[in-house]
Amino acid sequence: MLDIIFYSANNQEPEYVELSENIYEWLAQSTFSKIGQSLETKIKIDGEEEKLPLVPLDQENRRQLRLFFLEAIADESNVVLTQLETCAAKADYQQATYRLKKLQELRKCVENQNYQYLQRV
């Protein structure tokens, strides 16, 4: 599993979104990886100051990321609905909806104004 991490500027606990290698690779090759630029940023984690490559979630980056996730969710919803027509088992359902759930989780973090940075680990 790989993570995308969301940080706040006011020492709140970061939000870790765990992703499968498959989704992470897809994001890395998509427009997602081109939105915003990682900048070396000083941030406190567990009371320790760290310097990390973070993408600032300013108004423009947040807007572009939100649009990216809304479009990806719409596309993935069509795929999932088609797959669910043939799913009978719970495991099939979970597999069919995994990517959609992760995209929703990422979108919610991007929309959360408490987070000012994200890290593509």
Image (cartoon, grey):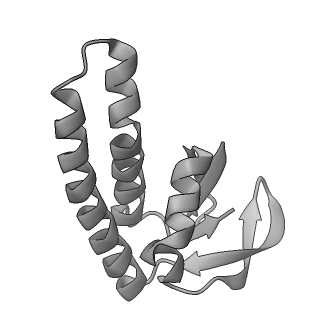
Q: Which quadrant, please, contains the C terminus?
A: bottom right
Q: Residue at x 65, y 76 (%)?
A: 54
Q: Is residue 38 left or right of residue 45?
A: left
Q: Quadrant of residue 18?
A: top right
Q: Which is more toward the observer, 65 or 110?
A: 65
Residue at left 40%, top 17%?
91
Query: Which is nearer the eye, 72 or 114?
Result: 72
Q: Residue furthest front?
A: 86
Residue 13 in the image, given as x and y percentages of width and height: 61, 50
Q: Is 93 located above or below residue 111 in the figure?
A: above
Q: Is residue 101 left or right of residue 38?
A: left
Q: Quadrant of residue 108?
A: bottom left
Where is residue 118? Give x, y as percent: 56, 68
Q: Residue at x 58, y 44 (%)?
A: 20
Please say if 55 is above or below 89: below
The answer to whether any part of residue 117 appears in the image is no
* Occupied quadrant, residue 24: bottom right
Q: Is residue 8 left or right of residue 88?
A: right
Q: Position of residue 63 (x, y in %)?
A: 31, 79
Q: Is residue 7 above or below residue 54?
A: above
Q: Nearer the viewer, residue 113 or 106?
A: 106
Q: Position of residue 46 (x, y in %)?
A: 77, 52
